[in-house]
Image (spheres, rainbow, N blue to C red):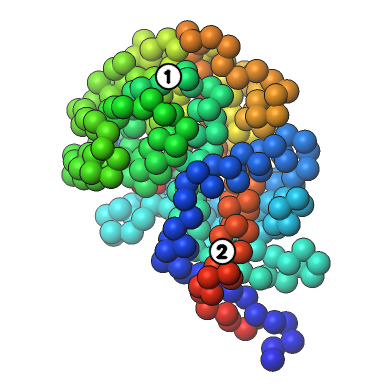
């Protein structure tokens, strides 16, 4: 027996095949935000390196004592991967033992990144979107376009139509066909961001993150009473559109400020609250049906570690994965 013990390795398909349902991930992510609001988590803003134009590799550590979860996600976003038939987002996540610090699990982080990001959007939408939201606009019909729709269906019971836009017509058509078949909603392909936003209650933008974005969405395209959740930083939204919001939220103020110092988010309005403060009731969510609301969700390591420990426990219970010597 190796004196250092073993780690459980979970490949991408190991994690995917556990098939943990979205409603459970939403509950987990919500609990993680509550822990954060009470100051009971540790998660410094993510440092990154940038080997290619508009690429990133981020280190995302977090510790959530109540969930007994500590670890690091090492995640890349490379926009040109699509040309190589590889996913934009890839990476690994390591969980550590709380007593010894030894690694206990190494897993592919693509599934977690997709699902927990959708779950965070859903957690925000529960408090910030109108209760009877019916029309969802998805701009960027890739992995996040899919997982965000999956999560929003869980919390928005009245959702009946998706207006989708993607710069790549093939991706758009594939999305429309797949999502229509999967959820039985009306999924409509649109040929411009402006048309995608027509009559929307909720809009999720999920194109690539660009350091010098060609922002397109104007304030006048976004209807009063709408809720916007950009996942691609401010790449899609013109300054006037962001500044037209009545309330501007984020998932973590410290992280937003950290990015501001690096030259991102120069035109965003003042943050009203972060999601933890809204979930805990410390700050208000939506107050009336006309408010224009945006939550700039940057993605937090607490969402990853909360989901990862759940995945790890399920994998051990189901005897999935491969034990490797350290
Ligand atoms: N905030 C978070 O927590 C979080 C987490 C994961 C990913 N993300 C971000 O979400 C975004 C999407 O990630 P993904 O994994 O879904 O990528 P993906 O490559 O699977 O999908 C991106 C889609 O956007 C389309 N696209 C590219 N440029 C576009 C444009 N100008 N207009 C419309 N569509 C365009 C592409 O054709 C593709 O279909 C990325 O910016 C990623 O960094 C954010």
Numbered badge on residue 314: 2
- Which residue corresponds to the image point at 47% horizontal and 62% vertical from the top-left? 18
Q: What kind of element bears circle 1?
A: loop
In the image: residue 26, left or right of residue 255: left
Q: Position of residue 312 (x, y in %)?
A: 59, 64
Of 128 and 108, which appears nearest the observer?
A: 128
Kindly indicate whether the residue at mark 1 contacts the one at mark 2 (C-beta within 8 angstroms): no
> Residue 273: image x %, image y %?
65, 23
Residue neighbourhood size for the residue with mark 2, other residues' Cα within 10 Å, grouped as few (<14), some (14–19), many (≥20):
some
Looking at the picture, how far across and down is residue 41, in whole percent? 74, 45
Nearest the viewer among 284 and 263 is 284
Residue drawn at point x = 65 percent, y = 63 percent: 95
Quadrant including the C terminus: bottom right
Q: Is residue 59 visible?
A: no
Quadrant of res 138: top left
Q: Ligand 1: which quarter?
A: top left
Q: Residue at the far right: name it.
A: 99
Q: In this image, 304 relative to 12: left or right?
A: right
Q: For mark 1, does the 10 Å Cα neighbourhood hold few (<14), some (14 to 19), or many (20 or more) residues?
A: few
Q: Quadrant of the N terminus?
A: bottom right
Tell me the distance, in whole angstroms, between the alpha carbons under discs 2 and 1: 35 Å
> Between 173 and 31, which is closer to the camera in this rendering?
31
Q: Is residue 300 above or below residue 226?
A: below
In the depicted structure, whether residue 290 falls above or below residue 239: above
Answer with the quarter of the image where residue 40 lies: top right
Number of numbered discs on residues: 2
Identify the mark at residue 132; answer none if there is no mark. 1
Task: Give the farthest residue toward the bottom.
Answer: 1
């Amino acid at each position: 027996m190796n004196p250092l013990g073993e780690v459980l390795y979970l490949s991408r398909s190991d994690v995917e095949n556990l098939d943990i349902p979205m409603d459970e991930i939403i509950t987990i992510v919500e609990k993680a935000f509550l822990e954060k609001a009470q100051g009971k988590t540790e998660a410094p803003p993510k440092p990154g390196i940038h080997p290619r134009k508009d690429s990133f590799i981020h280190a995302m550590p977090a510790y959530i004592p109540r969930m007994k979860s500590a670890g690091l996600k090492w995640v890349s976003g490379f926009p040109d991967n699509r040309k190589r038939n590889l996913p934009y987002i890839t990476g690994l996540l390591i969980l550590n033992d709380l007593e010894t610090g030894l690694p206990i699990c190494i897993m592919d982080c693509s599934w977690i990144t997709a699902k927990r990001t959708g779950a965070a959007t859903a957690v925000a939408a529960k408090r910030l979107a109108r209760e009877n939201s019916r029309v969802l606009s998805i701009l960027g019909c890739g992995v996040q376009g899919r997982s965000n729709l999956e999560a929003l269906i869980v919390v928005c019971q009245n959702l009946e139509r998706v207006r989708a836009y993607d710069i790549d017509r093939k991706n758009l058509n594939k999305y429309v066909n797949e999502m229509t078949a999967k959820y039985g909603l009306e999924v409509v392909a649109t040929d411009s961001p402006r048309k995608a936003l027509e009559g929307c209650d909720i809009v999720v933008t999920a194109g690539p993150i660009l350091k010098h974005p060609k922002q397109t969405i104007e304030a006048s395209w976004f209807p009063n009473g709408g809720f916007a959740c950009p996942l691609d930083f401010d790449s899609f939204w013109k300054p006037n559109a962001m500044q037209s919001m009545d309330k501007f939220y984020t998932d973590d103020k410290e992280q937003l400020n950290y990015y501001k110092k690096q030259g991102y988010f120069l035109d965003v309005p003042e943050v009203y609250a972060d999601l933890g403060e809204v979930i805990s009731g410390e700050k208000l969510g939506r107050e009336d049906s006309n408010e224009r609301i945006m939550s700039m969700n940057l993605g937090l390591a607490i969402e990853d570690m909360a989901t990862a420990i759940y995945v790890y426990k399920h994998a051990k219970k189901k005897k999935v994965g491969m034990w490797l010597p350290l």
